[in-house]
Image: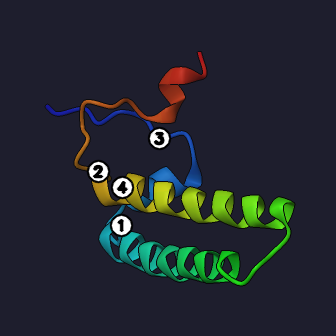
């Protein structure tokens, strides 16, 4: 009998569910829009502080896209619950 690892967050549970692929695709699309918006805003001549915030937000969105793009393919990476004990 196969035993899947426990999921710690609602998002992990939803991504592992029957609609997980649809949810992942929707989240990636939203994050792509967000990343693009922050990158475009960063190119408008903001103050240094605002520029750094926009670039950080764009990078955060890009990182989230990368993580979702690998989910659940990275089966060797334990769910977050493993890090909380």
Left or right, residue 75 beside residue 8: left
Q: Sequence-wise, which precedes: disc 3 or disc 1?
A: 3
For the residues labelled 1 and 4, the Cα–Cα distance comes to 5 Å
Verify CB contact (< 8 Å) between mark 1 and mark 4: yes
Verify CB contact (< 8 Å) between mark 2 and mark 4: yes
Verify CB contact (< 8 Å) between mark 1 and mark 2: yes
Q: Residue at x 71, y 67 (%)?
A: 54
Q: Sequence-wise, which precedes: disc 3 or disc 4?
A: 3
What residue did someone put label 1 on? 20
What residue did someone put label 3 on? 7
For the residues labelled 2 and 4, the Cα–Cα distance comes to 7 Å
Left or right, residue 4 beside residue 64: left
Q: Sequence-wise, which precedes: disc 2 or disc 4?
A: 4
Q: Residues within 10 Å of mark 4 (few under 14, many from 20)?
A: some
In percent of width and height, residue 24 lies at: 39, 69
- Single out the mark in the foreground, 3 or 2: 2
In percent of width and height, residue 77 lies at: 33, 31
Left or right, residue 51 beside residue 15: right
Q: Sequence-wise, which precedes: disc 3 or disc 2?
A: 3
For the residues labelled 3 and 1, the Cα–Cα distance comes to 13 Å
Verify CB contact (< 8 Å) between mark 3 and mark 4: yes
Verify CB contact (< 8 Å) between mark 3 and mark 1: no
For the residues labelled 1 and 2, the Cα–Cα distance comes to 9 Å
Q: Among all residues in the image, which is located at the extreme top?
A: 85
Q: Is residue 37 above or below residue 3?
A: below
């Amino acid at each position: 009998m196969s035993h899947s690892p426990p999921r710690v967050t609602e998002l992990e549970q939803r991504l592992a569910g029957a609609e997980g692929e649809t949810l992942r695709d929707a989240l990636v699309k939203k994050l792509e829009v967000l990343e693009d918006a922050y990158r475009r805003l960063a190119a408008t001549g903001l103050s240094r502080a605002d520029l750094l915030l926009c670039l950080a937000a764009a990078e955060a969105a890009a990182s989230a896209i990368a993580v979702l793009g690998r989910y659940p393919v990275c089966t060797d990476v334990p769910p977050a619950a493993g890090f909380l004990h």
